[in-house]
Structures are given as structure tokens and as C-alpha cells.
Image: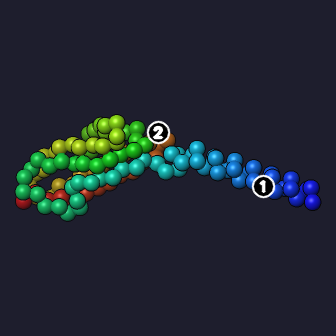
Amino acid sequence: MRVSHKKLLVSILAILILAYGFWQARDFLRGPRVVLEAPAEGQVFEQSLISIKGQAFDVSKFSLNGRAIFIDENGNFDEKIILVPGINYIEIFSEDKFGHQKKIERTVLLK
């Protein structure tokens, strides 16, 4: 009976160590998190100056159409760009400190 208690205790300890390891590695496993709130995919605009809005977390590099942009202390970003008549492509690129990358692309139209 005493041996089974030891095995149970060792098993519980091993599970706790593994759970703690996964908790500490969550940023590495998850990568950058970016939410692009505006514009919507396929959105049609009548004016050329628009806002690109959203939130970004766990990023070390962050760019809009190849140009570095910055986020505030709450993770928000709000950048203005000028559209050309016709179809316009918007690309948000992010990378975390571990090298994980995420790209969000949107296509919008200026009448």
C-alpha cells in the first residue's frame, strides 16, 4: 500500500511540473496575437484617407504595408493610409521575440 502512495505522489508532482512548464511556455507556443478591427475585407470606400485599427499583443516587430508602426501601452494601433483608386491591398505583419510570425491581409476598394 505504501508503494502506491509514492507512485501517486510522484505522478501528481510530474503532472504539476508539466502543467507549470506549459504555462511558462504559453507565449512561445502561442506566437503574436493581432486583431484587425478595421477595415473589413472587401470594404468599399469613397474617400482615400482611411484608418487601419486593431490590437496587437506579444509582438516585437509590427508593420503595415512594410512600414513599421507602433502600438500603445494597451496594445492598440490606429494608422492612417491613403488609398489609390481601385483595388488596394493592406498587409499587417507581426513577429514575436521567438521568431513566430503572423500576417493579416485585407483587400479594399476606393471608388
Tell me the quarter of the picture where residue 88 sits. Answer: bottom left
Which image quarter is the C terminus in? bottom left
Q: Residue at x 64, y 51 (%)?
A: 19
Residue at mark 2 to residue at mark 1: CA–CA distance: 34 Å
Q: Residue at x 52, y 46 (%)?
A: 28
Neighbours of disc 2 within 10 Å: few (<14), some (14-19), many (20+): some
Q: Residue at x 22, y 48 (%)?
A: 52
Q: Nearer the viewer, residue 9 or 53?
A: 9
Which image quarter is the N terminus in? bottom right
Q: Nearer the viewer, residue 81 or 66?
A: 81
Find numbered disc 2 in the image and state the secondary structure of the residue it sits on.
Answer: loop
Q: Tell me where residue 60 appears, x and y as whole percent.
A: 40, 38
Q: Residue at x 23, y 54 (%)?
A: 38
**Residue annotated with mark 1:** 11
Frontmost of labels 2 and 1 is 1
Tell me the quarter of the picture where residue 58 sits. Answer: top left
Q: Amino acid at mark 1?
A: Ser
Count every numbered label the image shows and give the total.
2
- Residue 107: give its label: none
Q: Tell me where residue 59 appears, x and y as whole percent.
A: 40, 41
Neighbours of disc 1 within 10 Å: few (<14), some (14-19), many (20+): few
Relative horizontal placement of residue 104, taking residue 107 as reference (left or right): right
User: Against 62, is 111 above or below?
Assistant: below
Q: Tell me where residue 93 appears, x and y as whole percent.
A: 34, 47
Q: Amino acid at mark 2?
A: Lys
Q: Among all residues in the image, which is located at the extreme bottom?
A: 42
Q: Is residue 99 visible?
A: yes
- Residue 97: give its label: 2
Find numbered disc 1 in the image and state the secondary structure of the residue it sits on.
Answer: helix
Q: Tell me where residue 81 appears, x and y as whole percent.
A: 16, 45
Q: Is residue 65 visible?
A: no
Q: Nearer the viewer, residue 22 or 104?
A: 22
